[in-house]
């Protein structure tokens, strides 16, 4: 059952990464300076996590991986919202 979630998370990760890349190309914003490094760090941790379900920092690797995927999606959605919002008050 967890393997099905992993596949769904990987597909959503790919789609959200493409959405964020398109956002970077279309909308240049100073807020992207905050979001991009966070996304890079999460993606790099996802790459180096072991495939086996072993304990890492006292937690299972699958739990850490699922949490990082969900954080990545939430940050991308938040980033899409804040970069498209107008900052003009008048």
Image: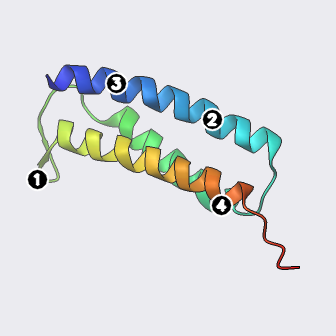
Q: Which residue is mark 1?
A: 58
Secondary structure of residue under mark 3 = helix
Residue 80: numbered disc: none
Q: CA distance from mark 3 to mark 1?
A: 25 Å
The image position of residue 16, as x and y in percent, is 54, 35
Q: Earlier in the sequence, mark 4 or mark 3?
A: 3
Residue 26, by quadrant, is top right
Q: CA distance from mark 1 to mark 2?
A: 33 Å
Q: Please give the count of numbered marks on the rendered protein.
A: 4
Residue appearing at x 43%, y 23% in the figure: 11
Residue appearing at x 63%, y 40% in the figure: 20
Q: CA distance from mark 4 to mark 3?
A: 26 Å
Q: Earlier in the sequence, mark 1 or mark 2?
A: 2
Marks 2 and 4: in contact by CB < 8 Å?
no
Residue 19: numbered disc: 2
Callout 2 crowding tier (Cα within 10 Å): few <14, some 14–19, many ≥20 = some
Judge from the rendering whether residue 90 lies leftward or rightward of residue 49; answer left or right.
right
- What colouring style does the render use? rainbow
The image position of residue 85, as x and y in percent, is 72, 61
Residue 82: numbered disc: 4
Q: Earlier in the sequence, mark 3 or mark 1?
A: 3
Judge from the rendering whether residue 52 lies leftward or rightward of residue 82; answer left or right.
left
The image position of residue 71, as x and y in percent, is 39, 50
Q: Earlier in the sequence, mark 4 or mark 2?
A: 2
Callout 4 crowding tier (Cα within 10 Å): few <14, some 14–19, many ≥20 = some
Q: Which residue is mark 3?
A: 8
Q: CA distance from mark 1 to mark 4?
A: 35 Å
Marks 4 and 1: in contact by CB < 8 Å?
no
């Amino acid at each position: 059952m967890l393997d099905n979630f992993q596949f769904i998370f990987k597909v959503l990760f790919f789609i959200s990464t493409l959405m964020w890349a398109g956002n970077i190309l279309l909308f240049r914003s100073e807020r992207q300076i905050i979001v991009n490094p966070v996304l890079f760090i999460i993606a790099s941790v996802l790459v180096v996590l072991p495939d086996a379900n072993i304990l890492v920092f006292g937690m299972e690797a699958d739990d850490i991986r699922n949490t990082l995927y969900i954080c990545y999606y939430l940050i991308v959605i938040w980033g899409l919202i804040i970069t498209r919002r107008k900052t003009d008050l008048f």
